[in-house]
Amino acid sequence: QVQLVESGGGSVQAGGSLTLSCAVSGATRGVSYKTYAIAWFRQAPRQEREGVAAIYTGGGSTYYADSVKGRFTISQDSAEKTIYLRMNSLQPNDTAMYLCAAAEGYALEPLRQNEYKTWGQGTQVTVSS
């Protein structure tokens, strides 16, 4: 089973930027890195987990929640098997634990958490006003 390790979280002021990383390792037997959907979710206290952005490692197609379109960018380094989430113009309501998730093959709804079986431990992002 694939393992995911997030990094890059921290504390920034409103308007600032952060880049999160999700290192992917241990691909399932017979399933290459090129056949995953990888997504970033976030969860704030007392709120539901929200899909933020997703990417297909094979074709590179990307998906974004309306709340982050134009501010966040998901990308990948295939050689390093790492998924990045560049977050610009951060606001206090972006404060949350950010988690990386993986699904083998095709996800019908790439930003829905039920599509994903493998999760990382998360990295905290705190934005102050």
Image: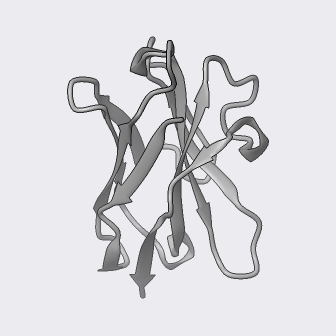
- Which image quadrant is residue 16 in? bottom left
Q: Residue at x 74, y 35 (%)?
A: 115
Residue 71 in view here: no
Q: Residue at x 49, y 64 (%)?
A: 122
Which residue in the rendered view is the most extreme toward the left? 79
Which residue in the rendered view is the most extreme toward the bottom? 129
Q: Residue 66, relative to residue 110: is it above or below?
A: below
Q: Nearer the viewer, residue 25 or 124?
A: 25
**Whole-percent x, y for residue 36 in the image:** 52, 24
Would you say 99 lies left or right of 77 here?
A: right
**Whole-percent x, y for residue 94 in the image:** 52, 69
| Screen quadrant of the N terminus | top right
- Which image quadrant is residue 32 in? top left
Q: Residue 11, relative to residue 54: is it above or below?
A: below
Which residue in the rendered view is the most extreme toward the front? 29
Residue 98 in view here: yes
Q: Residue at x 42, y 88 (%)?
A: 129
Q: Residue at x 61, y 17 (%)?
A: 105
**Whole-percent x, y for residue 6 in the image:** 38, 57
Q: Nearer the viewer, residue 82 or 43?
A: 82
Q: Residue 79, relative to residue 23: is it above or below?
A: above
Q: Residue 48, relative to residue 120: is it above or below?
A: below
**Whole-percent x, y for residue 53 in the image:** 54, 42
Would you say 97 lies left or right of 117 here?
A: left
Q: Nearer the viewer, residue 28 or 86?
A: 28
